[in-house]
Amino acid sequence: MKKLVNDVDDLLMDSLRGFVKAHRDLVTLNEQPAFIARSENASQGKVALVSGGGAGHEPLHAGLVGKGMLDAACPGQIFTSPTPDQMMAAAEQVDNGAGVLFIVKNYAGDVMNFEIATEMFDGESASVLVCDDVSLPADHSTGRRGVAGTLIVEKIVGAAAEMGATLSECQTLGERVNKATASIGVALTSCTVPALGKPTFEIIEEEMEFGVGIHGERGRETVALKSASEIVTDLASVIETELSITAGQKVLLHINGFGGTPLIELYAVYNLATKYWQARGVEVVRSLVGNYTTSLDMAGCSMTVTLMDKQFIELWDAPVDTASLRW
Amino acid sequence: MKKLVNDVDDLLMDSLRGFVKAHRDLVTLNEQPAFIARSENASQGKVALVSGGGAGHEPLHAGLVGKGMLDAACPGQIFTSPTPDQMMAAAEQVDNGAGVLFIVKNYAGDVMNFEIATEMFDGESASVLVCDDVSLPADHSTGRRGVAGTLIVEKIVGAAAEMGATLSECQTLGERVNKATASIGVALTSCTVPALGKPTFEIIEEEMEFGVGIHGERGRETVALKSASEIVTDLASVIETELSITAGQKVLLHINGFGGTPLIELYAVYNLATKYWQARGVEVVRSLVGNYTTSLDMAGCSMTVTLMDKQFIELWDAPVDTASLRW
């Protein structure tokens, strides 16, 4: 395994400690139980946003803690749910008297642990379940997974919370964004989970995984490697159908790298994707290109599209000041 | 070769077009000859900064065009110098009447072509040669290479130019930053240049390249794979000697990923690196962690250290608004 690590068991904590040192103006680390929180509490009366999930998706979620976005993030071990005590401790620290909104990616472990935390937490709370991955059917037994669309939910709801939206308004808004968002991805390689020490799955040089998640699992099918244009068409057409996108609509287009794909490719994919939507009369009004919701060192990318209305655009444009998203 | 591309020959232009679409508020693309420039010219009387070099190092340089940093960037094909006509056209467009400073990484092709551009350019110009890679001896026949320290030069000089420094002041400052900066890197894997279609060099699972450049060449030696702590010590001790760093000095510490190494590892390396310097009484006053000067999909990282004085800190902290660096 070729990784920059000491003991595999220390990787997450070494990384979190480095993260808060590098961004000490923005965040602090609570070590026991582990969570990242804003270095200065938000103003009294602001709904607090708490997210979290397994590590290995950096910068999600810790890189999105800060003004205009999350108040705290709870990292589990790599690809492993954080525990309820992390979530509860984070919620207690960042609660500003207006309640806590948990933003949860739809995975059984995360859902269960956030539910337990909600029950244990004395304050007022609500949750938004993100399930934007349309590679699985809508009636899949465990529901659809939360992937790169999570960032969109966190950004838009984060802005609303900053502007004074109530807990119930934040929850409703988050559910609206989730419903307006669809993602699907393709992997060219597997990732290597440090504790495993080898690629999670084998894939030959001429093939790729279509409809992948972000945990090194295989996609919904293994297909022949295609050109970037064909991949873009395959990804976008699934999203187009899922969201029933029609000419005249405005969208946010997010091309997300899984960690091992360089920016030169991601921007090329983005360029091809804008052409796909332009040809259909769909207006790409906002964009985000880069490695945001990663799967360690996996090569590949996902496309996320959110149908944007005036409110979403205004909230997307609102100021944000985190380690990885800032404007 | 597993890449998100159509025709390899189209990758760079597809990527540049995507880049300017995604950041149209910040930059524009001139296609013939190719360069990226600020979408709004800087104020009259500001020294214009023009950099460039082969593609494959994204976000360097195009991602660093904007207020507080570069005025234009000239991308060559992957790992290939841009041509003098690109540099000259860029210089002509962004010259605000106070002269143009070319920031050039020390590679024979880049140096030659920027020299030709300087001769062809009618306006006033000067150049700064960046040669921060201390993996090669100081008396190496072609001199030391310009690597991740280039970003530090561009940021600090960019801020000075914005504050009204003259061309000669910017040049002197750039040379001072370059002299105060040292970088050295380690590669765990080779990168794959699209036109070649396979890794540039072979490396077994148990080995790594120490003292690598950013063009997929081998390092100064192939050594056994080590722990992150040992790698940090090896990198930092070379820099410590080169810059004669002693207790009480203040440094900027930049851990740069080469493209294929995820953030979780880079922040862990950064954490270990801060401990190295702290143990020597050296104060890490500023930091930057992430994939900034990449080598396509190469796994590994470099450490860059700049000895910081009050002026450097003030200029580093000054506002910057580019696609990849913003505060």
Image (cartoon, coloured by chain):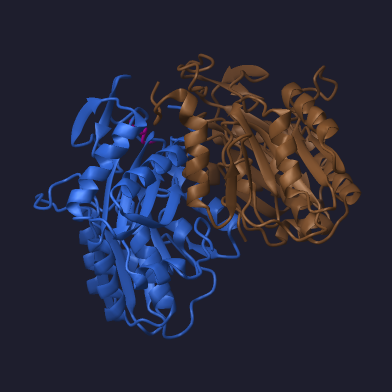
Chain colours: A brown, B blue
Looking at the image, residue B100 sits to the left or right of residue A214; the answer is left
Looking at the image, residue A54 sits to the left or right of residue A49; the answer is left
Whether residue A272 is visible, yes or no, is no
Whether residue B240 is visible, yes or no, is yes
In the rendered image, residue B197, in percent from the top left (x then y), is placed at: 37, 30
Q: Residue at x 65, y 26 (%)?
A: A213
Q: Residue at x 31, y 68 (%)?
A: B102
**Does B192 appear in magenta?**
yes
Q: Answer above or below: position of B121 versus B304.
A: below
Most foreground residue, A16 or A314:
A16
Residue extent of the magenta highlight: B190-194
Most foreground residue, B50 or A235:
B50
In the rendered image, residue B321, in percent from the top left (x then y), is placed at: 53, 65
**Considering the image in quadrants, where does the N terminus of chain A appear?**
top left
Q: Quadrant of residue A91?
A: top right
Most foreground residue, A165 or A137:
A165
**Does B243 appear in magenta?**
no
In the rendered image, residue A92, in percent from the top left (x then y), is placed at: 75, 43
Q: Residue at x 22, y 27 (%)?
A: B223
Looking at the image, residue A118 sits to the left or right of residue A324; the answer is right
